[in-house]
Every structure is written in C-alpha cells, then in structure tokens.
Image (tube, rainbow, N blue to C red):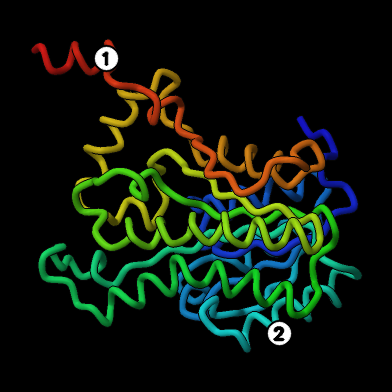
C-alpha cells in the first residue's frame, strides 16, 4: 500500500546492482511512494548488474559515476538537478567493497593499498558525495541523506575484515557532516545499520549463511529483510523524520540489544 510519502520529492540512488540489492528495492519503493530520482553506479558495476531494467521500471535516468571521483560526482549532481527539474531532496549511499575481502586476504595479512581502497570506496566516498552536494548547492532545505552501515562498525565479526573500519569511518562522517549540513541547509544525515541481508555483495562474504542464521536466532523479530530496509529508508526520506539527524539507526529486528535468545539457547543445548 502506498501513502505518497515522497510525492514531489527528487533524489539520487547509489548502488543498485540487481533485484537483490537494497538500493534496487529502495528505488522501487521510492517510485511507488511518488518520488523521482536518478540512478547511479560505477561503470563496472553497471556492466555486471541489471540497472537498465530498474531504470525502465521506474522511469529513471542513469548517470554513471565512480563515487570516489569528485569530477564524476559533480557531473552526477549537476545533471540530476537538470533532469529532475529542481534540487535534490534525498540521497541513498548504498556502496561498499573491499578488495581484501573479495580476494580472501586474512586480517593479519592485509594488502594496505587495497585497505585504503576499501576505506575510499566504502567510507570516504560518503564524504565526497556530501561535499559535492554542498559545493554544487544541489540539496533542498530539509533534505535527507542516508547511508547503509553494519554493526561491525561497533563489534568484531570474523571475515568482515577491513570493511569494519570502513563502516566506522562511514558512521563518523555521517555525524560530522550531519552537523554541518543541518546548520547550512537543515539537511539531515543518518546511517542505517541493517541486518545481514542476502544481497549479491553480502552473500559473497565467507561464512555468511551461518552468520545469517545466527543473527536470525538472535533477533526477537528475526532478520530485517531488504524490503523492510527499503521501507525504513523511505520513511527516513519523508517529512515524517525531519528532526532525526546524525544517528546510526539499528534496523536489525532487535539483534543489537539482545544478549541471548531462547532460540539460541535451544540450539546450543542440543
């Protein structure tokens, strides 16, 4: 059921790869709620994914951009304002990649050039996105900017490796830029720490299936799905959350507040 929560609002959605992506699901939900947007992803990701299908479904234009490139981002924001017919009301940063994780480098033997690339793509790019939005004066007052994070920014999880540091950087940037943008234009900046989700990227992490099941048992409501997350993002983009700023919002079915659950006790007692 749609509520027209985003009617008349314009935005940019980063990171839609295929139908398993949270960004993909968010784009569909934003479209359903009346929002207009451009889609963007790195050229290599666009070749791997199905973004053209999504664009057709939502009536959205695609603007390729490497989120680590200030030049690409300037072009993205400038063209988005032109295409959408006005300034931007919402931005979703759904970007994360670690060469060390992809290539199975153990945490005690990281390639530091790759580590810096992980930080740049998954964390620093969030600052670049917002700095570009500010410099191009692309954001409307009372806009909303959201990035997807993960609880590994606060707790250690095997095999998440240097992505944990990237997410910690991401959340810190959200607080610092959330303060700045709120003072400048009443734009709010938040991160959403999502349950483990069976996206194409997430499922590629070693041991993901086991941890997915563990998190599901540790969450009183179970793991939040990608569709659930898309709904939450829409609410964060809407005028209903105008005073929520500089927060890392846990969207995990209660995982982050649970010490142990009956399901896990039963599993461990066998």
Placement of 59 over or under 110, stated as above or below: above
Residue labelled with disc 1: 263
Q: Position of residue 131 (x, y in %)?
A: 65, 74
Residue labelled with disc 2: 75
Sequence-earlier tag: 2 or 1: 2
Q: Is residue 118 left or right of residue 94?
A: left
Q: Could you say whether the residue bearing mark 1 is in a helix, strand or loop?
A: helix
Q: Position of residue 75 (x, y in %)?
A: 71, 84
| Numbered marks: total | 2
Q: Nearer the viewer, residue 68 or 84?
A: 68
Q: Residue at x 32, y 51 (%)?
A: 203
Q: Is residue 128 left or right of residue 114?
A: right
Placement of 14 over or under 242, stated as above or below: below
Q: Position of residue 67 (x, y in %)?
A: 55, 76
Q: Position of residue 206 (x, y in %)?
A: 20, 52
Q: Could you say whether the residue bearing mark 2 is in a helix, strand or loop?
A: helix
């Amino acid at each position: 059921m749609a509520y027209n929560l985003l009617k008349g609002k314009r935005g940019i959605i980063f990171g839609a790869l295929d139908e398993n992506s949270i960004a993909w699901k968010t784009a569909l939900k934003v479209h359903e709620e009346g929002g207009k947007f451009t889609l963007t992803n790195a050229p290599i990701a666009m070749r791997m994914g199905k973004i053209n299908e999504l664009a057709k479904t939502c009536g959205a234009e695609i603007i390729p951009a490497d989120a680590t490139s200030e030049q690409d981002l300037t072009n993205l924001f400038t063209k988005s304002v032109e295409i959408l017919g006005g300034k931007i009301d919402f931005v979703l940063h759904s970007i994360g990649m670690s060469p060390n994780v992809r290539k199975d480098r153990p945490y005690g033997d990281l390639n530091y050039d790759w580590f810096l690339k992980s930080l740049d793509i998954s964390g620093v790019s969030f600052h670049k996105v917002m700095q570009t939005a500010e410099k191009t004066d692309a954001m409307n007052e009372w806009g909303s900017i959201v990035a997807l994070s993960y609880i590994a920014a606060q707790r250690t999880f095997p095999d998440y490796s240097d992505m944990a540091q990237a997410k910690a950087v991401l959340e810190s940037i959200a607080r610092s830029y959330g303060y700045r943008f709120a003072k400048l234009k009443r734009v709010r900046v938040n991160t959403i720490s999502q349950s483990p989700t069976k996206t194409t990227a997430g499922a590629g992490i070693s041991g993901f299936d086991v941890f997915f099941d563990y998190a599901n048992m540790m969450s009183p409501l179970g793991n939040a799905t990608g569709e659930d997350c898309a709904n939450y993002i829409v609410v964060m983009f809407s005028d209903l959350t105008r005073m929520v700023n500089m927060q890392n919002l846990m969207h995990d079915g209660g995982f982050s507040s649970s010490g142990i659950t009956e399901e896990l006790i039963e599993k461990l007692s066998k």
